[in-house]
Structures are given as C-alpha cells and as structure tokens.
Image (cartoon, coloured by chain):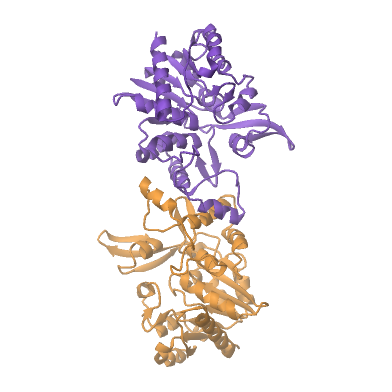
Chain colours: A purple, B orange
Amino acid sequence: MRIVALAGGIGGARFLRGLKEIVSPADEITVIGNTGDDIHLFGLKVCPDLDTVMYTLGGGIHEEQGWGRADETWSIKNEMKAYGVGPEWFGLGDRDFATHIVRTQMLGAGYPLSAVTEALCDRWQPGVRLLPMSDDRVETHVRITDEQGPRVVHFQEYWVRLHAAVAAEAIVPVGADTAKPAPGVLEALAAADVILFPPSNPVVSIGTVLAVPGIREAVRAASAPVVGLSPIIGGAPVRGMADKVLAAVGVEATADAVALHYGARAAEGLIDGWLVDTADAGSVAAVEAAGISCRAVPLLMTDTGATAAMAREALTLAESVRR
Amino acid sequence: MRIVALAGGIGGARFLRGLKEIVSPADEITVIGNTGDDIHLFGLKVCPDLDTVMYTLGGGIHEEQGWGRADETWSIKNEMKAYGVGPEWFGLGDRDFATHIVRTQMLGAGYPLSAVTEALCDRWQPGVRLLPMSDDRVETHVRITDEQGPRVVHFQEYWVRLHAAVAAEAIVPVGADTAKPAPGVLEALAAADVILFPPSNPVVSIGTVLAVPGIREAVRAASAPVVGLSPIIGGAPVRGMADKVLAAVGVEATADAVALHYGARAAEGLIDGWLVDTADAGSVAAVEAAGISCRAVPLLMTDTGATAAMAREALTLAESVRR
C-alpha cells in the first residue's frame, strides 16, 4: 500500500511514528513536508518541520521538547549571545546546527532542497520517503498589529518569539503562488492508495503545503481516499497555537469547523473522512452532514501505542470510504 | 610607545601575551596578523591565526592545545562525521564555530575582514589592535610530491592533515601579489616606535604578511628599529614544523640562517636586531657579521614570565639599535 501524508512538525511527526508501527514492510509511506516555516538564520537554511519529521522518525529527536536533537549542546547559542549576535529567541543547538550547515552547503553547491533532504535522510533512515512540498522558497508570514503598529513578521517570529500572543490578522505563504511542487510530490499523490492529513496545523502546516499550486488539485484528483485527523480536541489545539492561526482564516477552533474548512471532496473540498476525538463525538453529525465520513476515536498521542491506534483508525476509515 | 608586531598563530600569540605584561598602559600595540592560513570550511571563513591571537590575548584560548577555545564542545564535528561530511582532519569546535559564523555573516553583509576582526575583538578585548594583513583573500598553498604525484595543497592540508611529513617544494601565497594591506597597516608601520617579528614562522606566517605588496617596503622605510626573535632553537623549531617550510625557500633551520633570510636593513633587508636563544650563542657572531645586532637570551616561552622577559630583551635591543 502506498500511503501519502502531508505533514507539519511535531504533530505530524508523532503521528507518522504511530503510522510506521502499523504498516507492513511492503507498504510505502511518502511524507510531503511543510517548508513554509523555513527560516534563514546565521546564513543557514533551517527547515524546522522537515527536520522534526526526520529526527522523530530517525531516532534523533529530543522527546520531551518535540523538536531539536536529543543530547544537545548549546555552545554556539552561548557564544552568539557573548558576541551580541541574535536572534536569541530561536533555539538552534550545536547538533542541530550541523544539519543546517550540511543543508546550506549542499544548497550552495546547487542541489535542490529535495535532493538535500534525501541526502540528510541517508543518515537518519526515517523509514519514509520525505519530500519537501517544494524546492522553491516559501516562507509563511503573519500580519499582526501590536505596540509597533501593523506589521508583518516571519511565522517563526510570530510563533516562537511572540508565542502567538497577538491576533494573527492574515497568514501569507510568501512565494507559494509561484512555487512548484518538488519532484515526486504530484506523482506520489496520483499513485497513492491512501492520503492522510495528520493532526498537523491546518493553516500553517497542511494549509501551506496545499497552497503550492498543483498540490491541492492533485489531492482532489487522486483516486485514493483522503482522511484527516483533527488537531483540535474539545475546542482547543492539543499542542501549539492552531486556534490563533485558524482565527486568521475565519475558522472556529473546533474539530468540525476544521473538517468543514478542508471540505468534502464531493463538494469541491479535499477530504473523504475525518477523525475527531471521543470528546468531540457531538460534532460527528455536523461533519457527516457535510458529506464527510466521520468517526470519534481517541486522538491523544500519549504514546506510540495510542498513536498507532489512531493511525489504524485512519486507515480503517479510508477503506470504508474507498470508492 | 607604539609597538607594531607581525604575527602568525600560536608562537606570535604567546609572545604578544608576554609583551602585554611589560608595556605600560599608555603604550599601544598593533598586531598585523597573518591571514594566509585562512581556509573556507563548511561555507565559513576560518581565520586560524587571527583567532589564535584574539583568543590567546582575550582569555578564551585552549591553553594546552594553543589553538581553539577553552571548554570546547565537539557536537558539530561528531555530527559532521555522522553525516559523512568532511574534512575530518580540521578540528572546529562548537564555540569556535560561532566565531566563524559571526565572521562569515558579517563578510556576507559586506564588511571587510578588518572591520569584522574589530567587531569580534569588541567581545574579546585582546588589549591590542588586531589588524589582518589584508582584507583581500590570500591563501597559502604548498607544492608537494607524494604518492598522488606532484600537486598543490592548501597550507592547512599540508600542516594539519599531512603533518608536513612530505617535503614542501614551494610555498605559494595565492592572491598575495594583488592583495592590498588592510586599512591601518601601512600607517601603523610608518608611525611605529618599535617593530617586532615575534618567534612566528618566518615563511608561512611573517613571510606571508611580508608578501603583501607594500608591507615589506613599509617595514624597510619605517623609522622604527625592527627586531626579531628566532623561532629556531638549537637547529629545530620550538613548535610546529618551520624547518619544513624553511627548506622550501632554501633556508637552513638555524637561528642565524633565519636572521640572514630576513636580512639586515642596512643591506636591503628588514631587521636591525635579532635575538637567538642562549643555546645558539655560537651563532651571534655570524648574525652580527651580517650587520644585524644580535643577543643570545633565553627564548623558551615556558610561561608568561619567561615570555615577558623575552619581550623586554627585544625592546631593549630595539633601543640599542635605534638610529
């Protein structure tokens, strides 16, 4: 079975780890990773979401933190502070730095991000084919108004520095309009037996992947069933600040509102099936009324076992909606 | 008193630490640092000699090693190895990396190396004005013949990777012929009260500084006395492999041969005075016969006290030859 998943960072990566537990060795998982949260720091190209997937599936992730490397050291960060060189708010550990150095060198030598990602994965052996959504530069920016007045900040500044404490007025994936899907992305979607939307951020993670011209269309055109898992449980994001960016696109932070935001494939939308948490069982009817098959199952990724069970539910739901 | 010293790495840096001990607060020390051993690694501009001077005088040096940072961590090096990305033979610690990242960013932003060096020194406060010999790129290469046949390697590859184990057939400071002295270099030499050649490598350190058009001429034209200290004691370099590169320029590895290699200012050469170690007292006559004032004093930089005594001898000799 060929499974294709769109993924952001922590939520997507953890879900994929569960998914890997339940697939058979003959199954192939292709991950189309969000690169809209990429940032250039210290002259280096940093791809937080791709790296979170790679480290999580490759056994190098800092488990408690969810991002960055296990057994990390922070010499460079301390030195940068001593030199008075910022930004201080973005945490890049020494081990993590090495990944960005290798990536930046390869990009500088002319390799596209997809080839670089493949080379990095040669080491990490994540057990999935990890594709960036695009080899072209896309950077998500957020329009806010704070004490400095109305302004646009990089997504990472909004998320990491400002902790999404001010309202996001608009989310702009700069460069997405002219970006092309990375090699293999459209082919993977066309050849997929199942397409999954993990419980990643529907706006700045999966939404950004879908903003690359051709990807949304390929999902809609795919013969495979498309099943998503709600990142919202009981009216709040399980992790992160998805509610803040959902508000920017006029979507309520509820499990059913996110499903309707993606929309039913039968009605010009994207998904055939949707999983909500048991806490949101009351919203199943509304989702189904929109033409999306919906089940309420436990969606808390408390451990790999619980996450594997979620993945199994997603695949089961996919089979039930297969045309 | 305005003291100008030409300097390479470890030997020069340690001498300068001794010199700092004996000058008065009103004295100014300007160091013209060798940049011929600069190397580009991992997309970063690395200036080993400048950094060794900066770290040594600024209190950040790894004392036993003589280069690199104290309390260093090696996460990046380990990661690079895990990624299979070389070179493995050049040791860049994490703390050291930060310096190169800051430098490379500033160079990329358009600042010349001299301005970058000044900015880095803002943190380290080395107590001297540290100038690179040039803002232009100069890289020392070494012609060798080994099992791969005749070839040219970067100086660092010859020194660090090959341990100077094969004969150096020629030393080529690539780019020196068109390099310009960095801002302040010629002015410092012209205004100097004393010019010192520390016991740095006469070929690949001081020789490279002198290879920048204008610097040799400025030393010769300076009104200040020029005094050097022999890096060779008892027919061998105190540290490093200076004998290998001296052979490449046809100079014997003896204290007097190096003095004659610099030559007497009175005879189109560069130096007025020369200090040899007491072990080389027998060579004083030969140096003096060439028109260079020479004294035999202890030249082993065993500690800061011994090094300060050497610096005092150098300044005393300078006074005795002042015209």
How many marks do you count on the picture?
Answer: 0
Q: Nearer the viewer, residue B188 or B79?
A: B79
Q: Nearer the viewer, residue B289 or A266?
A: A266
**The quarter of the displayed image where residue A195 is located:** top left
Q: Quadrant of the C terminus of chain A?
A: top left
Q: Quadrant of the N terminus of chain A?
A: top left
Q: Nearer the viewer, residue A290 or A111?
A: A290
Q: Is there any visible trace of residue B111 in the rendered image? A: no
Q: Is there any visible trace of residue A175 in the rendered image? A: yes
**Outermost residue, front side:** A279
Percent of width and height locating residue B185: 59, 69
Residue under the point 37% across and 58% down: B89
B64 versus A174 height, above or below: below
Classify residue B155 as left or right of residue B98. Answer: left
Residue under the point 46% across and 12% down: A272
B130 versus A179 height, above or below: below
Percent of width and height locating residue B58: 57, 67
Q: Nearer the viewer, residue B157 or A97?
A: A97
Classify residue A272 as left or right of residue A24. Answer: right
B178 versus A32 height, above or below: below
**Outermost residue, left side:** B147
Percent of width and height locating residue B305: 52, 81
Percent of width and height locating residue B153: 36, 60
Residue under the point 46% across and 25% down: A6
Classify residue B218 as left or right of residue B206. Answer: right
